[in-house]
Image (tube, helix red, strand yellow):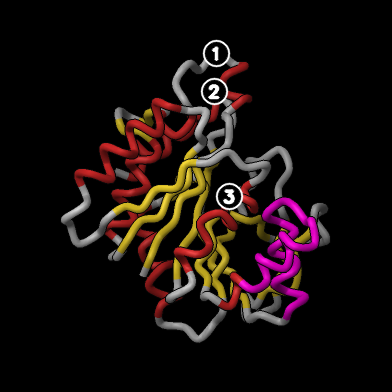
Amino acid sequence: MKFAVIAAGDGSRLGREGVAVSKPLVTLNGEPMLDRLVRLFTDAGASEVVMIVNERMPDVVAHVRAMEEERRTTACPLRLKVAGTPSSMHSFHAISAWLTDGPFCLTTVDTVCRPEEFKAYVQAFMESDADGFMAVTDYVDDERPLYVGTDGALNITGFYDEPHGCRYVSGGMYCLTPAAIGTLRRCIAEGQSRMRNFQRQLVKDGLKLKAWPFSKVLDVDHAADIVKAEQFISEIR
């Protein structure tokens, strides 16, 4: 199974708050966020890691190029796309041609969760017949959360900008089959943007999506989030 990382944003909020390093290389307890994800992917049995990074971040490009070379002859090589894109959905589209040959897991670079929960999430998806497993959590720590509607069996019924009585919000991790790529390409062709609009379209297209609850998922969008993420990681080690 392939794993993919979207790391093509400009990290502007962190920069404005005094964080000098590029977002993917922000360290959490001594380990760059990007490296931590690659380690989690490898532990979860990844056959390949696909990554898109921003061309305006030469330090990140150099870092990933070195990782790519180091992993070239390993059981889990890394494939890199260097590009600037207007949104995470466009970043996903830019690497989608490499994700059409089987199930895959996609996440943004700043996602922090419990490793054992991530591994269980991936395993459950691989054993299911669903078109997608969306990571969700009832821990809400986002400025603009995406609320996820579910039925009693955790089938996803909708994605909303407002609570709508939903228990869960999106955790920013997506296990999908290649069926989702067709929806993604149509969204791009229609001029849509934002990952949440892509997710809504998946529901409209009738794909079978399941919610997989995590106890906590953190995003590192602000300088204060670095402290919270480091504390969280310390607690789960």
> Residue type at mark 2?
Ala
Q: How far is mark 1 from mark 3, CA to CA?
A: 26 Å
Instruction: Report the residue at 36% width, 53% height from top.
Output: 79
Left or right: where does residue 38 sit relative to residue 163?
left
Secondary structure mostly taken by the magenta-highlighted segment of the chain? helix
The residue wearing badge 1 is 18
| Residue appearing at x 72%, y 68% in the figure | 186
Mark before the other along the chain sequence, 1 or 3 = 1
Which secondary structure, mark 1? Answer: loop
Residue at (33, 29) in percent of width and height: 29
* Type of the residue with mark 1: Gly
| Magenta highlight range | 182-205
Sequence-earlier tag: 2 or 3: 3
In primary-sequence order, the first of circles 2 and 1 is: 1
Residues at badges 2 and 1 in contact (C-beta under 8 Å)?
yes
Question: Label 2, on which residue?
Answer: 223
Relative to 56, does residue 183 appear above or below in the rendering? below
- Mark 2 neighbour density, 10 Å: few (under 14) some (14–19) many (20 or more): some
Q: Kindly identify the amino acid type of the residue bearing the numbered disc 3.
A: Ser
Report the quarter where the N terminus lies.
Answer: bottom left
Task: Please give left or right for residue 36 compared with residue 91 in the image.
Answer: left
Left/right placement of residue 165 relative to residue 88 reads right
Q: State the image quarter where residue 34 is shown.
A: top left
Q: Which residue is mark 3?
A: 91
Quarter of the image that includes the C terminus:
top left
Q: Secondary structure at mark 2?
A: helix
Q: Position of residue 108 (x, y in %)?
A: 52, 47
Question: Which is more toward the observer, 137 or 127?
Answer: 127
